[in-house]
Image: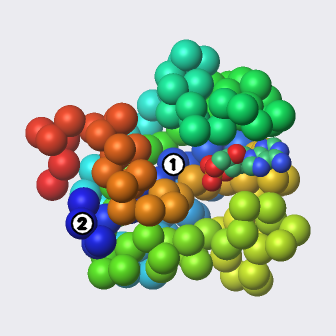
């Protein structure tokens, strides 16, 4: 993933609310190609590993409990300038601060239950994609 790929999860709140289709439609409409995708569920242990970078934050326990509370959709997406364009599409972490028309503005419940994840760098996109997908599961 060099510059043109990012990793996303549609989080438990958005899956439970029936918003997988709406969110994927926005992702496709924005020009992202889906390279790999699966409906899956994180164990509490794997949620902790995925978000290990936040382990010293006060919300880490809540984050791991929430991210392992129900099914998620994990996907690798491809587009020129993928990291920045996807973060613009999803909006700010806290939906209160997200721009109108962004995925989080439309579908997030709160800063904790914020509908989608988007990688913040090429390096993290690579690591996060590899967390969920082997090289044989990517197109
Ligand atoms: P995400 O983009 O997946 O990356 C880290 C996640 O931690 C973030 O989305 C939020 O879901 C969560 N998060 C960040 N800040 C807070 C907070 N102040 N309280 C609860 N959860 C948070």
Q: Is residue 137 left or right of residue 56?
A: left
Mark number for residue 9? 1
Q: Secondary structure at mark 2?
A: loop
Nearer the N terminus, badge 2 or badge 1? 2
Q: Which residue is mark 2?
A: 2
Tell whether circle 1 marks a residue whose Cβ is less than 8 angstroms from ligand 1.
Answer: yes
Instruction: Measure the C-alpha gap from mark 2 to mark 1.
Output: 19 Å
Above or below residue 134? Residue 30 is below
Q: Is residue 27 left or right of residue 54?
A: left
Q: Residue at x 36, y 62 (%)?
A: 122
Q: Residue at x 45, y 31 (%)?
A: 40
| Residue 133 in the image, given as x and y percentages of width and height | 28, 38
| Quarter of the image that includes the C terminus | bottom left
Residue 107 in view (yes/no): no
| Residue 106 in the image, given as x and y percentages of width and height | 74, 69
| Residue 28 in the image, given as x and y percentages of width and height | 41, 73
Quadrant assignment, res 83: bottom left
Residue nearest the viewer, comparing 116 with 16: 116
Tell whether circle 2 marks a residue whose Cβ is less than 8 angstroms from ligand 1.
Answer: no
């Amino acid at each position: 993933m060099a510059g043109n790929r990012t990793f996303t999860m549609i989080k438990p709140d958005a899956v439970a609310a029936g918003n997988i289709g709406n969110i994927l439609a926005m992702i496709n409409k924005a020009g992202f190609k889906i390279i790999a995708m699966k409906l899956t569920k994180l164990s509490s242990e794997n949620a902790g590993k995925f978000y290990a970078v936040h382990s010293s934050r006060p919300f880490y326990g809540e984050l791991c409990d929430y991210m392992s509370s129900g099914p998620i959709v994990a996907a690798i997406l491809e587009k020129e300038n993928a990291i920045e364009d996807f973060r613009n599409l999803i909006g700010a972490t806290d939906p209160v601060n997200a721009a109108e028309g962004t995925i989080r503005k439309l579908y997030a419940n709160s800063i904790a239950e914020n509908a989608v994840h988007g990688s913040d760098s090429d390096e993290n996109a690579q690591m996060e994609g590899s967390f969920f997908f082997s090289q044989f599961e990517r197109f």
